Amino acid sequence: MGTYDLYANDPAGPLWRVPATGAARFTWEYDDGRDRLLALYQKGKDKQWDGRTRIDWDLEVDPYDALGTPEEAMSLYGTRHWDKLSDRDKGELRRHYASWQFSQFLHGEQGAMICAARIVESAPDLDAKFYSATQTMDEARHAEIYGRFLHEKMGLLYPVNDDLQALLGDTLRDSRWDMPYLGMQVLIEGLALAAFGMIRDTTNKPLPKQILTYVMQDEARHVAFGRMALRDYYRQLTDAELREREEFVIEGCYLMRDRLRGVEVLENFGIPRAEAEEISEQSEFLRLFRKLLFSRIVPCVKDIGLWGERLQRAYVDMGVFELGDSDLDQLMAQDEELADRLDAERFAAEERERVAEVEATIESGATED
């Protein structure tokens, strides 16, 4: 069974073609680079891993309660539609919501893979090209893992959300070499990290927790890369050039805020689009969720030097301005630490199982004697 047999809605064609502009840049300086970026490149090489072996794919997943989502977190909860749903319907709604979320993660990771490859092509500095090459592999691995989870554990996918697709298209069509950094490393990756983190920290299901924890360990490096490269470059830009980047950030943030409604899911349960949008907008849980999703983006935007008056006003309008003072380094360090801790816990559990198996074998042999 192919992916097209599992889509809840028609993806509208097998390929999406985005016309590419801009120049491929070669550099003949091979012995010069920023120490921080080269250290990050080394870390990117050291931290490569195999999704087939690091993830425990034998863990069972109930597709009708894949994330342990409480009823109160469902946007339909408390509406007239909720009372009409049977327990089976509620399970199906959970399945669709989880599949929609992880499908957007999957499509975003493919976009990240393509953007990372574009950075390899267009960045003027070799240290940035080196690191982006490791990130391209990371993003391929993430797309592989999310695709496998959706195919094997959920049996359902959703097409790319319109607003996410719009932001990906804007990022890839721009001829300026720094825009894949800004669109992907700062905006889309920042949003993904926050979304991954909220599910990682609230789910009680071991397989999605494992997947998200390990993916976030990689993503923490990716955001750090975007911050380093863009902070250096944006110090050189004119006020007019900075304003152009800020306009891109404003538009991108509004697009991402609006993409997080999951209206497509409610439409598939017979709710008209206008009503589905209103229900999603009024959901207290979704309102909090959408605000927290900017916890990684706002401090990163401020850190790289995009903090003009219009951008600040936009963040005030979104209710996320105060997030600019968040400690991004602490959040990233925590992402890496949690993945290392999960590895240690799993290794210790596997070691205990091996010891118990050896002891049981020895005891069995002694009994036979």
Image (spheres, rainbow, N blue to C red):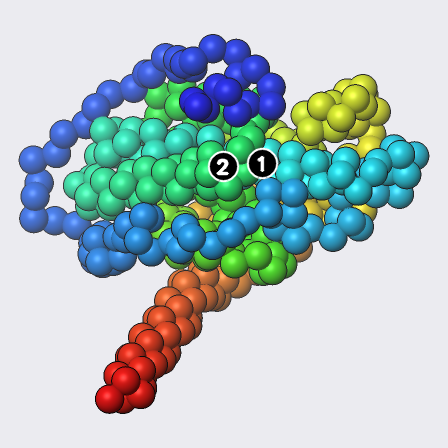
Q: Label 2 belongs to which residue?
A: 150
Amino acid marked by disc 2: Leu
Mark 1 lies on a secondary structure that is: helix
Residue at mark 2 to residue at mark 1: CA–CA distance:
7 Å
Q: Identify the mark at residue 99; answer none if there is no mark.
A: 1
Q: Residue furthest front?
A: 369
Residue 238, given in percent of the width and then of the height, sits at: 41, 34
Question: How many residues crowd mark 1 within 10 Å: few (<14), some (14–19), many (20+)?
Answer: many
What is the three-letter code of the residue carrying label 1?
A: Ser
Q: Which residue is painted at 43% across and 13% down in the image? A: 14
User: Which of the 4 quarters of the picture holds residue 22?
Assistant: top left
Residue displayed at 37% across by 74% down: 353
Quarter of the image for residue 125 reads top left
Disc on res. 152: none
Q: Is 52 or 300 nearer to us in this picture?
A: 52
Q: Is residue 180 left or right of residue 26?
A: right
Image: 351 above or below 314: below
Given residues 35 and 162, the one toward you in this image is: 162
Total marks shown come to 2
Q: Residues within 10 Å of mark 2 (few under 14, many from 20)?
A: many
Q: Secondary structure at mark 2?
A: helix
Tell me what residue is drawn at x 33 percent, y 48 percent: 51
Specify the quadrant that holds the C terminus. bottom left
Circle 2/circle 1 CB separation < 8 Å: yes
Specify which label sits upstream in the sequence, 2 or 1.
Answer: 1
Residue 323, visible in the rendered structure: no
Q: Out of 14 and 4, give the one closest to the viewer.
A: 4
> Horizontal and vertical percent for residue 64?
65, 43
262 up-or-down from 341: above or below: above
